[in-house]
């Protein structure tokens, strides 16, 4: 992120999505109207991914504030990033940076897992220019699915 001119400090840290992260989401995010779209059932979805052979899940923190979550899995030669959500607090300290944090964590996971492609599954159409600026290619396949991907 420093290469992008984004200043971060030692209060930024990443963890897996564990009970503490899920509890923080429930406690900290419930005071705000839910993200639209978003407001995923993280407890359910993290539980499903834990059954995968190679799950990816990351919680993005700034100090004690949970700012974002990301979830995916390795599938063959790629890592699919399936869910990403930032805190609904409009003033959280990493506003507009969650996609970069989750992307960097997923990219590192993909490299370590020997994947060749990082794929964003079902991206929001309005976010496509943001993902293209981050180096992703927008793909519409024959089945009508929309995703973004880039080489690892």
Image (cartoon, rainbow, N blue to C red):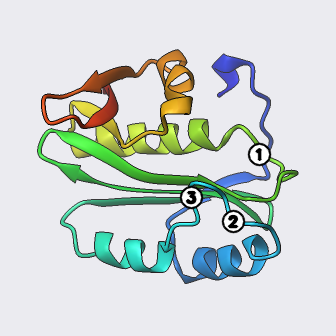
51 over 115 or under it: above or below: below
Q: Secondary structure at mark 1?
A: loop
**Could you say which disc has been placed on residue 38 in the image?**
3
**Could you say which disc has been placed on residue 34 in the image?**
2
> CA separation, marks 1 and 3?
17 Å
> CA separation, marks 2 and 3?
7 Å
Residue in view at x 83 percent, y 51 percent: 90
Q: Residues within 10 Å of mark 3 (few under 14, many from 20)?
A: few
| In this rendering, position of residue 4 left or right of residue 136 | right
34 over 85 or under it: above or below: below
Q: Secondary structure at mark 2?
A: loop
Q: Residue furthest front?
A: 144
Nearer-N-terminus badge (2/1): 2
**Could you say which disc has been placed on residue 94 in the image?**
1
x and y, in percent, of residue 120 in the image? 37, 39
x and y, in percent, of residue 71 in the image? 42, 58
Residue in view at x 55 percent, y 31 percent: 127
């Amino acid at each position: 992120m420093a290469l992008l001119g984004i200043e971060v400090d030692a209060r930024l840290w990443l963890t897996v999505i564990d009970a503490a992260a899920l509890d923080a989401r429930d406690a900290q995010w419930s005071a705000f109207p839910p993200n639209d779209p978003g407001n995923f059932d993280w407890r359910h979805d993290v539980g499903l991914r834990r059954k995968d052979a190679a799950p990816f899940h990351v919680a993005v923190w700034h100090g004690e504030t949970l700012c974002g979550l990301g979830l995916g899995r390795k599938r063959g030669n790629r890592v699919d990033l399936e869910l990403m959500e930032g805190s609904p607090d409009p003033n959280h300290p990493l506003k507009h940076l969650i996609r970069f944090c989750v992307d960097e964590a997923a990219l590192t996971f993909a490299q370590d897992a020997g994947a060749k492609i990082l794929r964003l599954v079902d991206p929001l159409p309005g976010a496509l220019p943001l993902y293209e600026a981050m180096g992703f290619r927008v793909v519409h396949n024959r089945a009508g699915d929309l995703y973004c991907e880039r080489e690892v």
